[in-house]
Image (tube, grey):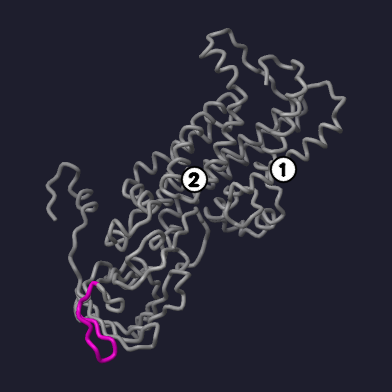
Amino acid sequence: MTDHVNEPWKGYEKVAFRFFFLYFLIQAFPLDPKYFAQVFSLPWSKLRYEDIFTLAHYTPRFFGETPVFADWSIVILLSILGTGIWTFADKNRTRAYDNLYYWIRVIVRYRLAIGLLAYGFIKLYPLQAPYPSLGNLNTHYGDFTRWKLFSLSLGIVPSYEAFLGGVEIAAALLLLFRKTASIGALIVVFFTGNVFMSNLAYEGGEYVYSAYLISLALFVLAFDIQRLGRLLILQLPTAPNRFTPSLSLKWQQYGRLGLKTIFIFFFVVLFGFRTHWGYHHDPYQYPETKGLTGASGLYNVTLFKLGKDTLPYSSTDSTRWTNVVFERWSSLSIAGNRPVIIDSANTENVTAVSDIKKTYELEGSDGRNYYQYEVDTLRHLLTLRNKNVRDSSDKWVLQYARPDTSRIILTGINQHNDSVYVVLDRINKKYLLQEAARTGRNGSLKL
């Protein structure tokens, strides 16, 4: 507000402060009873990184589960109403709001740090944008949405993704200390500003949340922006604002230190450890269950029978398969001319769900139908269920035979209870990304 501690505030400054105090208090501090119900329902003895991320991803929501800018309008209206009541009740106040300004800035700093740490760790250990699946590598470029192309482009360079996560974590740690908070906020403005523009350009679903983080960073930065402008632009002598609250009692000093220690342990140490473990054992984008042993790869559909009819290869036939991809995990994808209802979900949903609900591989892509399958090794049976929620009735029950390591024969019934007989032959395809990584950038590369 001003360069000098305890300098009297002007009337309009007090009114503006009351509004911004209420606005950022509502935005930063969870006041929703559902949030606290969620907190108490968590498995605290077996806490997962998905649980911590869900807590950290909170924003006030009045119009559904997905954040929208309309939520902000409600917060603004509540803040205006509260400002009017506060102004009337406090009209005779002559003292400034230095203490309140300090504490609301603390709340915003730590809330911003939580958001950065949540995203920072799932990038540091490349979980947010994992390496493309085989199904994605065998999908035509034009069959992806812009958001999916961006995510896949990030996923093929995990070291760069980890670097981005490191920047977010570093900015968060700077925000935890008053002397470096403005530096951390300045990093957030530029870094998350780029994230915001990327979300708009690539039609990502997190543009509202990234704008939310930017607004918090701007509020933190506003504390020093006037002094920075005076010093760097006007090149005038500038006194730092050394205001600190009076914490003279022992319980206040130990309480402050204790809360900070708990925060760092929970959101930095514990969350970092859990995310590292999850990267190796519990990825939230891809299923955990292992697929059919030794089946991972791309297969050409050599023969396809529907009932007694043999269907020849056709680029326009919506029934016949073109090729099949078995992943390392328990999902497979089928390419053909059958229409695909694109799953355009592109918001970050880091939650512990069953494998069939882990839909990253099919989100934002056309040209392939993705199935989660269960294997009965005793009866040599595959039960396929379409992973797209809009096509959940699509179920296949197929017997499998493996006469050799390069051929799989499937017989059974499709979603319409028609009998099918399919012969799959493995294609020993080499992938440019994997070969380049194996041989090195300057190595000999032959496909």
Q: Quadrant of the N terminus?
A: top right
State which tag comes first along the sequence, 2 or 1.
1
* Secondary structure at numbered mark 1: helix
Picture layout, residue 404 above or below residue 150 = below
Left or right of residue 35: residue 124: left
Q: Is residue 329 magenta?
A: no
Q: CA distance from mark 2 to mark 1?
A: 30 Å
| Front residue of this view, candidates 40 and 8 | 8
The reply to whether callout 2 and callout 1 are in contact (CB within 8 Å) is: no
Badge 1: how crowded within 10 Å, few (<14), some, or many (20+)? Answer: few
Left or right of residue 93: residue 270: left
Picture layout, residue 319 above or below residue 243 = below
Q: Position of residue 260 (x, y in %)?
A: 63, 36
Q: Residue at x 49, y 48 (%)?
A: 273
Q: Nearer the viewer, mark 2 or mark 1?
A: 1
Residue that carries the numbered disc 2 in the rendered image: 119
Which segment is the magenta one?
A: 303-315
Q: Residue at x 50, y 45 (%)?
A: 207
Residue that carries the numbered disc 1 in the rendered image: 77
Q: Position of residue 80 (x, y in %)?
A: 74, 38
* Secondary structure at numbered mark 2: helix
Q: Residue furthest bottom?
A: 308
Classify residue 159 by image quadrant.
top left
